[in-house]
Amino acid sequence: MAKNGAHSVEGYYYEDEDLLEEARKEAEGVRYMKAKIDLQNPERVLQIYNRMIEQRAFQTQVGYSYLHELQDYLYTMPNIPNDQILSIPVCGTIRVTDASFTTEKLREENKSSRHVLHVSIIGNVLAVLVIAAMFVIVLSSDRPTVLNYEKKLLDKYAVWEQELEERENAIREKERVLMYGDDN
């Protein structure tokens, strides 16, 4: 994904902080070399170019771009034989090793994150099942709970009230029979 901003150097975007810093240093070196190299002397440019290649002076796209500019310039010079112009080596062993190490490290972190995610999902499913079981137990229980306390209490008082009314009616009936006799 191409971006501009603090991670861009000479039109190249770097996600890796180390490469970004290296590219910044190389950009300074390129500016210095452009100021010092006399393009009117192609033999001297060839010597400097080949020395930079042999010393692997540049390791990022910023440096490679500059080397490519010099290479193109040297190819256009009729008095410079093309077989004396060295090719630009673009893959250094340090960068490749670092990249594979980073990839392996990211893979291990990804595996670890997946494991944590799976354990978390299993834990959450178990928690939901336990909560659902608790609700089933509470709703099917005869004992009053916070959820059905008011209903159970009202039902209990309604039963008592009905029993009291039946007893009251029975007592009134006996009183009537005792007071008036069994005339019916």
Image: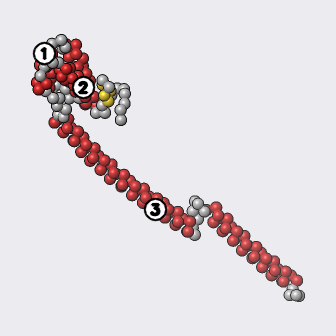
Which quadrant of the figure contains the N terminus? top left
Q: CA distance from mark 2 to mark 3?
A: 61 Å
Residue 129 disc label: 3
Q: Tell me which label, 3 or 1, sits earlier in the chain.
A: 1
Residue 85 seen in the figure: no
- Nearer mark to the viewer, of 2 and 3: 2
Amino acid type at image mark 1: Arg
Q: Tell me which label, 2 or 3, sits earlier in the chain.
A: 2
Give the image quarter of residue 46: top left
Left or right of 183: which side holds 122? Answer: left
Q: Tell me which label, 2 or 1, sits earlier in the chain.
A: 1
At label 2, counting other C-alpha atoms closer than 10 Å, the crowd grade (few under 14, some 14-19, many 20 or more) is: some
Residue picked out by circle 1: 44
Left or right of 118: which side holds 167? Answer: right
From what the image shows, is residue 57 above or below residue 179?
Answer: above
Q: CA distance from mark 2 to mark 1?
A: 19 Å
Q: Secondary structure at mark 3?
A: helix
Q: Residue at x 23, y 19 (%)?
A: 30
Amino acid type at image mark 2: Ser
Residue 8, position in %: x, y? 32, 27
Left or right of 92: which side holds 168? Answer: right
Q: Secondary structure at mark 2?
A: helix
Q: Secondary structure at mark 1?
A: helix
Amino acid type at image mark 3: Leu
Q: Residue at x 72, y 74 (%)?
A: 163
From what the image shows, is residue 5 above or below residue 166?
Answer: above
Give the image quarter of residue 79: top left
Q: Residue at x 57, y 69 (%)?
A: 142
Residue 65 disc label: 2
Q: Residue at x 21, y 23 (%)?
A: 72
* Viewer-side residue, 175 vs 8: 8
